[in-house]
Amino acid sequence: MLEKRSLSYVDGPVPVPVDDCFLLENVQRIQICDTDEWLDKHKVLLFWQVRPVVYVFQLNEDGPGEEPSGDDTLSIFNEWALPAKEFDGLWESLIYETGLKQRLLRYASSALFFTERGVDPCLVSWNRIILLHGPPGTGKTSLCKALAQKLSIRFKSRYSECQLVEVNAHSLFSKWFSESGKLVAKLFQKIQEMVEEENNLVFVLIDEVESLAAARQAALSGSEPSDSIRVVNALLTQMDKLKSWPNVIILTTSNITAAIDIAFVDRADIKAYVGPPTLQARYEILRSCLQELLRAGILTHPQLHDHFPLPTYATLKEKLHSCEAGELHGPVYLPRLLLEAAELCQGLSGRALRKLPFLAHASITNPSTCTTSTFLAALIQTARRELSESRAEHLYGQNFGEAVIYHNQRQSLVRKAFRALYLQL
Ligand SMILES: Nc1ncnc2c1ncn2[C@@H]1O[C@H](COP(=O)(O)OP(=O)(O)OP(=O)(O)O)[C@@H](O)[C@H]1O
């Protein structure tokens, strides 16, 4: 079907052919993805340059399951059977310029491949631990979930079952002194049970890992109670135990790497920095938002919608390069406004960028009659406002941060609660 369809490949959906009854009855969606793996040397990917690999899968719609912690309402972890409906499309929606996604995918694939081939870990060592660190809102947690989803699809033939376990780090701190270490052991006991099933591929996601693996140095200096040392010790021991199981990958994220215990950082095979989006990524994020609003009919622009999708960053750059000065009000007028918005948004996180179109829409007095160019003007205005507010927030945040002196991990709960409250205000 693919070969009959076209001579070249691009990432994106392929309509299910209406003349193929079997596909029409059984297939909900066909999507080409990850062509960028092949695109290093070729600009256009012709069908004879690649050997497409087809993955057929069914999304799980059951939603997350929970494991209660016993003494209070917080659950120790949430668990998803992958591939899950919730994470569908997440991988494609995350835009990074530096080939970060491919790097992570290749790393995880190699880790699973080495294990499958029985490479001796005493000779070649790998821990199957990934640490993503960087400022808030840069998509670290989403990237971990998307990676797990992607690998569950890719390794379906080897692992018939796949689970994502999202650890709720805060639930592991007991109000009872010395109980926290035991809670960590209990959590890993559950994970161990999942891992013992050899057809099960398990991803363990520990968000904000600094709250669990806080530097023991601080404790030794006297400001941390020994219970928090117990948690770090328990975590490291349990992780080392899990290492002998081939079918588990630990994904961790952190906003403050400096606060993580060095022994933990050392165990991570990949320590990838996830920074704020670059200009190209910002343009692509906003472009995908606009395409979605066009698809949903919230924005209408007949020319843009059907025949002239907003160009990619690379195409726009080429167009602008070859454009005469007078032509700038022609077909590149709207993409240029979008580029202006993307340029302006320097410093905003991916999370803030994805919210921007919504805020822009809410700021328009009569949105039902709004054209794409009016919308883009509103987007630029909203970006300006958001930026000035985030600068003010930053200043306030600095003073706020100085005022809060935190001695142990439990304080990180307080910090989080304050931050959430502050963001709501
Ligand atoms: N590079 C990006 N490309 C596209 N979307 C992004 C990007 N970065 C962030 N986002 C958007 O921001 C949302 C929130 O990201 P996420 O919660 O994963 O970030 P985070 O880095 O884990 O944040 P925190 O450290 O505050 O927990 C994502 O679901 C996604 O919609």
Image: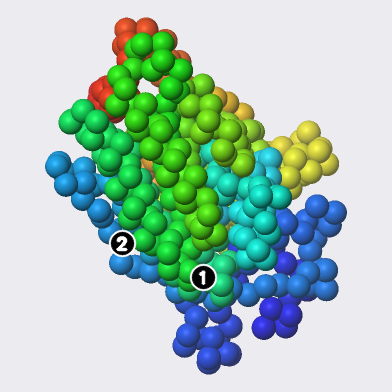
CB of mark 1 within 8 Å of CB of mark 2? Answer: no
Q: Is residue 384 visible?
A: no
Q: Which residue is mark 1?
A: 159
Percent coordinates x, y for residue 349 in the rendering: 50, 32
Q: Secondary structure at mark 2?
A: loop
Percent coordinates x, y for residue 212 in the rendering: 38, 33
| Residue 280 sits above or below residue 395 on the image | below
Residue at (38, 37) in percent of width and height: 234
Q: Nearer the viewer, residue 193 or 171?
A: 193
Residue at (51, 70) in percent of width and height: 159
Q: Which mark is residue 63?
A: 2
Image quadrant where one finds the N terminus: bottom right
Residue found at the very far front of the displayed protein: 122
Q: Label 1: how many residues lie within 10 Å, few (<14), some (14-19) or many (20+)?
A: some
Residue at (55, 43) in percent of width and height: 130
Q: Secondary structure at mark 1?
A: loop
Q: What kind of residue is marked 1?
A: Tyr
Residue at (47, 85) in percent of width and height: 26
Q: What kind of residue is marked 2?
A: Gly
Q: Nearer the viewer, residue 190 or 411?
A: 190
Q: Name the image quarter holding residue 360.
A: top left
Percent coordinates x, y for residue 160 in the rendering: 48, 73
| Residue 338 sits above or below residue 87 on the image | above
Q: Name the image quarter holding residue 324.
A: top right
